[in-house]
Image (tube, coloured by chain):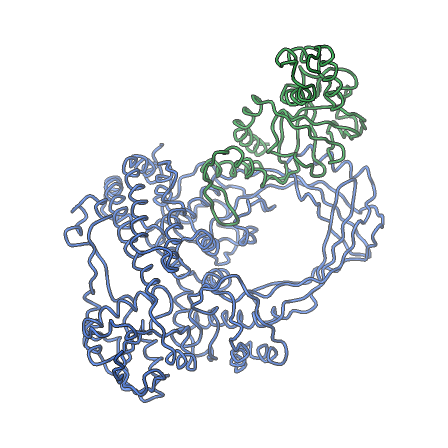
Amino acid sequence: MANGNAAEIGASIITFLTAKGIPPTQAWLQTFLSSVRLTTPVVALQQTALFQIRNADLQTSIIRSASTVLPPGITDPEAKEKHIRGPITVQVLDVEDIGRSRWSQVEAIEAQERGETTKGREVIRVVPEENGPDSTAAVDEAKSAGPHKLLLQDAGEAQVYAMEMLPVRGLGLQMSIGTKLVLKDFTVARGLILLEPRNVEMLGGKVEAWDKQWREERKQRLKAKAGMREEG
Amino acid sequence: MPNSRVNRVLCVAEKPSIAKAVANHLAGGQVNTRNIRGNPYVKNYEFQYNFQTWGACTVTMTSVLGHLLSHDFDARYKGWKSCDPSQLFEASIEDFVEESKQPLADNIQAQARNCQILYIWTDCDREGENIGTEIRSVAVKGNPSLSQPGKTVRARFSNIERAHIVNAARNPIALDEAQSNAVQSRIELDLRIGASFTRNLTLSVQPMLRQHFGNDDQGVISYGSCQFPTLGFVVERYLRVRNFVPETFWTIKVMHEKDRIKVNFRWARNHLFDRMVVVILFERCLTAKTARVTKVQTKPTSKWKPLPLTTVELQKCGSRFLRMDSARVMQVAEQLYQKGWISYPRTETDQFDRDMDLRALVQKQTQGGDWAQFAQGLLNGGFSQPRSGHNNDKAHPPIHPVNFVNPTQLTQDESRVHEFVVRRFLACCSEDARGSKTEISILYGGETFSTTGLTVLERNYLDVYKYDRWTSSQELPRFQEGEVFEPTEALMDEGKTSPPGYLTEPELIALMDANGIGTDATMAEHISKIKERQYVETRARVRGARQDDDDEAASDGEAAAAPEAGRGRGRGRARARARGGRGSAEGRGATNGMQEFIPTTLGVALVEGYENMGFEISLTKPFLRKEMELKMKAICEGRKSKAEVVHETIEQYRDVYIRTQQRLDTLRAAVRKYCFGENA
């Protein structure tokens, strides 16, 4: 398809992304198509599109329809239990390790800020390497056993909490904010989505600005929460 | 090579007690004891001995009192204000014999004149190797031929039991120059670094303290490259305790009564810090109504006997089981060694050599003591080869009893430490304790809960090692896999996190050990030093829930513990040398005697002052010192020379010194904040 026409390419991208659970809006698709060279092989364009849409805000990039958003009333605490078939794509707005106290997480962050980590009783100096942020993420991940509680958002109006009932690979504090998940065949209890490996597919992705802000504010947020609990 | 005849040998031990014991073993009672001029403790023991290497000889056995040489700066640098402290990094150092030691040096020099062989009997460790070279340097002044190869030898021994000593006398080896060099570098580095930083620190801070408190009590404020990281650990924990914020957590408890036994099941998630989530999960349990047994498993289990005893372990156990601080335990162990009851107490080795006749050592303990019967039991078939740890310093075996002693011959402290060493040794030679452990898991509303039961079947080593506890739990009723039941009780409960305890001595020793601060032989001294300097204080830990997490220094103190009411929080200032201000805790029952460390205001100020300077490498962190210890090791193993190590290390510290110098205001601010209570 050396001289592919825009409509055909657009259609193939829609088909591709829809199969992945991320049907793009026309507006997003147009912007995308105008930013790439249409002479590029379609397979490569599909991959580029997938990469970019994963890093975009779901709210403006995915079609809103009854089948792509969570059903109304999902956050209703009066509803004891609901089953939802899906698949529905959501993005991560927040993640918390609820298996550890906030304060212990604050302490871990502060040790990291001092350039230290511990291995058993040994205090180890973290020598900043070129891939600095990654190494700190690795430290964080190692200590974050979960379970994790997430705040998820769909393409529509819903923001809903989810809980990691069984460990889900790739889910944790090292995960970027804006990560996309596809949920299918899952249970919602009193407004809380119950996650297990069998009902979550991690698509990955990251909304850079959100992620940056989330990481910058994480310590403050944990401190505030630790303190708040204590007052109550 | 001229094989000149040997007929006179000079032996020199590290302490008088060892000289005396060795002389008696070798001479078999025929000893002439002579006083030496100018020192009442050191004696010369003269006797005849037939050495395997040299034949029949006349022997003089004498001793020193630890190090023979002292090292200090040239006179022109001695005055505190004689020079800029940084000049001490390269100022010339003199080696000399201190006045009090001069009679010992004179004695060795005089005795050396007539002999052909100098036989060193210092303790077999780095320090002993260095003292050996000091003795040689003095002896050579009286008899230059002793510097020739093979003329100065040393004995390799690790206890003063007779057969062991005789064997050592037969097999002389060479002095280990590398180990001696390592000690020399350490001495030089400690002197230069200690003096320069101490002067700098004292000149910067002492006048402030004197002015503020209007007196001249404030003495030297010393710096030591081990002391400061040791203090750093204490302050770090102190601040963690002070800054701690308690948090609420929630849990689900399930109890089921069967066969008139109430069984408590523990939630696999332990507890969570989110109420909403726990409420929802709890509701799902209640909705499910019934629980299903998913696992019933009984398997053999054992509690392992302890590892052979090292110095660090002895010190930790001393605080924990005998309520003696590490310095005291070492002092007592040293006495027991000098009297010939236990092996050399400074060792890193936690494995017994396969060739050692352990049964013979056990045999000696059948002569008496509360453990005699147990020891006999080992000989009657209960013996089992000790476990092997990962450490071997290749110099000394693990600490063990070498002879039987009637406890009535010992002082109270000696007998307690001795008892511990004996019991530990017998435990090592015994079988692990054995039991059977049953685990039952249930699935209830999607959540897993479990309970375990333990039945101790054979106590084995526990019978002699009274310091370990392992007891059977309540018996569990029979459950079948797949069995479904409605739990008698399920409830949601909440608790609060509690702060970690202040650092205890076993924890501090473990931290120093893991971070390379000091050696097993010197840790206790560093701890005493920071107490003596009034950087920290100790007090008895209050008996309470926290006592359990001694072994969990690294845990984040989230045990569900009693509420910590009345605890002042916030960035508290340390109580200046005042005791017992910790709110209600003080009144809450008996202490268990274990000491915990609390920094003084000065201690906190020093740590925070240096840390706030914001360097990559802080003096209160273990990193620099650890590097230095590793370099000492490199010298011992021949990978680095003394000159290289001294040069590299001095440059590192000089760099830190210069940067510290530029930010002394930060240190002064910390002193004002903590010692004077001014707001930063």
The location of residue A174, given as percent across then percent down, is 59, 33
In this rendering, the answer to whether A200 lies above or below B408 is: above
In the picture, which chain is green?
Answer: A
The location of residue B315, given as percent across then percent down, is 45, 62
Question: Is residue A180 in view from this perspective?
Answer: yes
The location of residue B599, given as percent across then percent down, is 39, 47
In this rendering, the answer to whether A189 lies above or below B47 is: above
Q: From the viewer's perspective, tell me whether residue B494 is left or right of residue B671.
A: right
In the picture, which chain is blue?
Answer: B
Q: From the viewer's perspective, tell me whether residue B283 is left or right of residue B484.
A: left
Q: Residue furthest front?
A: A2
Question: Is residue B230 in view from this perspective?
Answer: no
The location of residue B266, given as percent across then percent down, is 71, 48
In this rendering, the answer to whether B168 lies above or below B279 is: below
Q: Nearer the viewer, residue A175 or B383?
A: A175
Instruction: Say which quarter of the image contains residue A36.
Output: top right
Q: From the viewer's perspective, tell me whether residue B579 is left or right of residue A154.
A: left
